[in-house]
């Protein structure tokens, strides 16, 4: 279930807020400039649906977001537990970074956790099927797929280059609860 947990960025053991209420999640994230929406991921898709099929199933929703945000590029990322590069991907996404581009993701299936560091706090957002999150350019963050990643997400970008991370070198991600701590 979608969940927002907020911590001081200096103390991962001190919880300032913990909620599963999607309206509250949207409100809290909006206050720091992050978009959060609940769509309905109810399209019938094959387990191995390719990028074209996934984008076709959500073309109206994606078109709206692209028009509203001035986005020009879209793709689909699917990572399964048997992916031979899963550990490398997890390490890459777990490193705190920023982007020059917004990071917009719609979870078609599965789940993962975004960690957003802003205003002296860490906002841990466990996203699942039907969640759309839009992290504005420049917000320091990281993403955790868990040790056995299992998700499919539509990624929306303003530039054709897509995901380009600028890593901070800070090890903050090592100090906060991992994605799997929410699933046990």
Image (cartoon, rainbow, N blue to C red):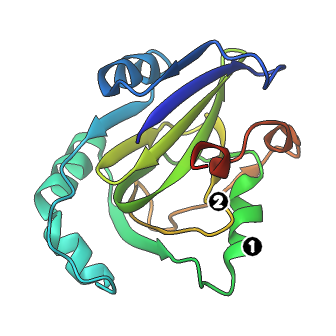
Residue 95 percent location from the top left of the image: 77, 52
Q: Which mark is residue 129?
A: none
Left or right of 19 in this view: 90: right
Rate crowding at label 1 as few (under 14), some (14 to 19) or many (20 or more) other CA atoms within 10 Å. Answer: some
Q: Which residue occupies 79% across, 22% down?
A: 13
- Residue lying farthest front? 184
Of label 1 and label 2, which has the lower sequence position?
1
Q: Secondary structure at mark 1?
A: helix
Name the residue that disc number 1 marks: 87
In the image, residue 13 above or below residue 181: above
The single residue placed furthest to the left in the displayed view is 60
Dots 1 and 2: beta carbons under 8 Å?
no
SS state under label 2: loop
Residue 173 in the image: above or below residue 123: below
Q: Is residue 102 above or below residue 58?
A: above
As drawn, the label of residue 146 is 2
Residue in the picture at 11% in, 57% down: 60
164 or 82: nearer the viewer: 82
- Write the residue at 69% across / 70% down: 89
- How many C-alpha atoms fall within 10 Å of the one at disc 2: few (<14), some, or many (≥20)? many
Q: Is residue 62 left or right of residue 155?
A: left
Nearest-to-viewer mark from 1 and 2: 2
- Along the line of sight, the residue nearer the viewer: 50 or 167: 50
User: In which quadrant will I find the N terminus?
Assistant: top left
> Which residue appears at 51% of the width and 42% of the height?
126
Task: Determine the CA span between mark 1 and mark 2.
Answer: 9 Å
């Amino acid at each position: 279930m979608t969940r927002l947990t907020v911590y001081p960025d200096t103390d991962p053991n001190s919880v300032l807020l913990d909620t599963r209420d999607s309206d509250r999640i949207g409100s809290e994230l909006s206050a720091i400039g992050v978009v959060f929406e609940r769509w309905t991921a109810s399209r019938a898709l094959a387990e191995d649906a390719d990028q074209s099929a996934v984008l076709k199933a959500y073309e109206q929703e994606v078109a709206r977001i692209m028009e509203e945000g001035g986005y020009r590029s879209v793709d689909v990322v699917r990572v399964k537990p048997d992916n031979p590069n899963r550990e490398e991907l997890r390490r890459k996404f777990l490193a705190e970074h920023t982007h020059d581009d917004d990071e917009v993701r719609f979870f078609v299936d599965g789940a993962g956790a975004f960690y957003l560091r802003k205003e002296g706090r860490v906002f841990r957002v466990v996203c699942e099927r039907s969640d759309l999150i839009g992290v504005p350019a420049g917000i320091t963050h990281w993403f955790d797929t868990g040790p056995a990643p299992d998700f499919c997400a539509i990624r929306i970008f303003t530039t054709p280059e897509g995901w380009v991370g600028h890593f901070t070198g800070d090890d903050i991600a090592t100090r906060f609860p991992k994605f799997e701590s929410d699933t046990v």
